[in-house]
Image (cartoon, grey):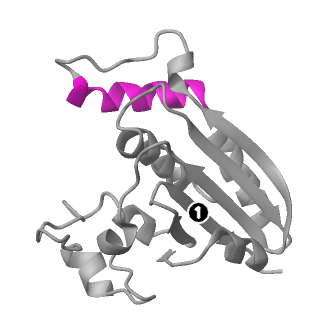
């Protein structure tokens, strides 16, 4: 995967966009028995909320299967799953009443999956090291990206943005940082 600075429109041009294949809005709070944070357990809601997501939403599997069929090889659902989890846990701050939108654009040369949370976003250029289209592999891959206070945004290497680094796709943030576009290009 490559973390890139591209707009959705640029990605749609690359795949020679044809149609919107799937469009979902996920609001976990609409389901009965959805776990909810309390004052005492606000920090412990993540695991039950993620478990609840995968019991009630199978769109990530269907999307991954669609991409696999188009691509001609097995494409695990982990990148889409991770992005959905990230949107719910970090973007929406574990609030099951906030929506997460998933839209799949199908094209002649590929697929773009867009995931949008309802959070306030973040400065993805600062956090990912994208500055004027340049990025440092050494900073991103091994040592983390220091924010303006000197803290590393990659913590414990293997989580966060590093998950996007090992997938054969392009990932781009848009807007205020609460929209993630994942580009899967196919050979034609």
Apparent side of residue 93 relative to residue 108 in the rendered image (left or right): left
Quarter assignment of residue 168: bottom right
Q: Residue furthest left?
A: 150
Apparent side of residue 55 relative to residue 95 in the rendered image (left or right): right
Residue at image mark 1 = 181
Label 1 crowding class (10 Å Cα cut-off): few <14, some 14-19, many 20+? many
Bounds of the magenta segment: 42-57
Quarter assignment of residue 39: top left
Q: Does the magenta portion include 72?
A: no
Quarter assignment of residue 111: bottom right
Instruction: Please tell me which residue is depicted at 66% across the width and 68% down the height of the picture.
Output: 8
Q: Residue furthest top?
A: 32
Name the image quarter holding the C terminus.
bottom right
Residue 148 image position (x, y, % from top left): 17, 71
Instruction: Please tell me which residue is depicted at 45% across the width and 26% down the height of the picture.
Output: 96
Instruction: Please tell me which residue is depicted at 64% across the width and 43% down the height of the picture.
Output: 61
Apparent side of residue 119 relative to residue 172 in the rendered image (left or right): left
Majority secondary structure of the magenta segment? helix
Q: Does the magenta portion include 51?
A: yes
């Amino acid at each position: 995967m490559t973390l890139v600075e591209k707009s959705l429109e640029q990605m749609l041009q690359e795949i020679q966009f044809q149609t919107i294949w799937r469009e979902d809005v996920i609001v976990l709070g609409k389901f009965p028995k959805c776990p909810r944070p309390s004052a005492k357990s606000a920090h412990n809601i993540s695991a039950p909320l993620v478990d609840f997501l995968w019991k009630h939403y199978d769109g990530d599997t269907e999307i991954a299967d669609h991409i696999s069929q188009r691509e001609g090889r097995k494409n695990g659902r982990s990148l889409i799953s991770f992005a959905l989890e990230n949107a719910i846990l970090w973007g929406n701050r574990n609030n099951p009443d906030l929506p997460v939108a998933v839209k799949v654009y199908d094209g002649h040369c590929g697929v773009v999956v867009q995931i949008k949370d309802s959070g306030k976003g973040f400065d993805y250029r600062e956090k990912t090291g994208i500055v004027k289209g340049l990025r440092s592999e050494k900073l991103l891959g091994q040592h983390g990206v220091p924010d303006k206070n000197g803290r590393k945004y990659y913590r414990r290497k293997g989580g966060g943005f590093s998950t996007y680094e090992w997938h054969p796709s392009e990932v781009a943030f848009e807007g205020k940082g609460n929209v993630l576009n994942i580009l899967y290009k196919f050979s034609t």
